[in-house]
Amino acid sequence: MELKNFQKSSGTFVQKTANPGMFKDLDATELYCPKCKKAVPVRKRLLLLLPEGDKYEYRCAFCAESVGTKIDRHDKPVISEG
């Protein structure tokens, strides 16, 4: 493993990928639920519309416990006219 294959990002080293946009948008299909005490399928629901992106919440498909959040960042910044 050579250091040239890594780039420094916020104090840690992250491995460079051949195509940086390859994993730009991922959605979770299973996450750990603390209430069910196991990895479970999740449902993604829109929580907030923010200037920097849309915030989604992941909920357990069995008990509806909140198990995580995600912000989908917009490709272009939203410019308000005013």
Image: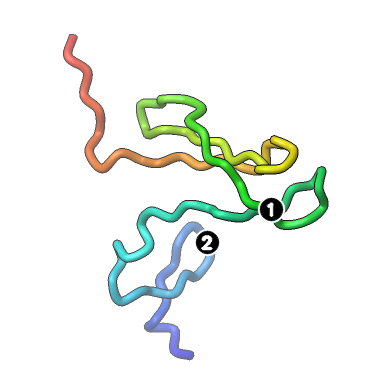
Q: Judge left or right: residue 62 versus residue 4.
A: right
Residue with the mark numbered 1: 40
Q: Amino acid at mark 2?
A: Gly
Q: Residue at x 61, y 55 (%)?
A: 30
The residue depicted at 48 percent of the width and 90 percent of the height is 1
Dividing the picture into quadrants, the one containing residue 18 is bottom left
| Residue placed most toward the observer, 32 or 52 | 32
Could you tell me if the residues under marks 2 and 1 are in contact, i.e. CB atoms within 8 Å?
no
Query: What residue occupies the far bottom of the structure in this picture?
Result: 1
Measured as percent of width and height from the top left, residue 11 is found at: 52, 61
Which image quadrant is residue 77 in?
A: top left
Residue at far front of view:
62
Placement of 58 over or under 26, stated as above or below: above
At label 1, the amino acid type is Val
In this view, 78 is above or below 2: above
Would you place residue 1 above or below residue 27 in this image? below
| Direction left: furthest residue | 81
Q: Which quadrant, please, contains the C terminus?
A: top left
Q: SS for tag 1? A: strand
Q: How far is the residue under mark 2 from the one under mark 1?
A: 32 Å
Front disc: 2 or 1? 1
Disc 2: CA contacts within 10 A as few (<14), some (14-19) or many (>=20): few
Q: Residue at x 66, y 43 (%)?
A: 61
Q: Earlier in the sequence, mark 2 or mark 1?
A: 2
Dot 1 surroundings within 10 Å: few (below 14), some, or many (20 or more)? some
Residue 12, image x, y percentages? 53, 65
Q: Nearer the viewer, residue 35 or 80?
A: 35
Residue 57 vertical position relative to residue 48 in the rendered view, above or below: below
| x then y, percent, for residue 7 | 40, 71
Residue at the spot of label 2 = 11
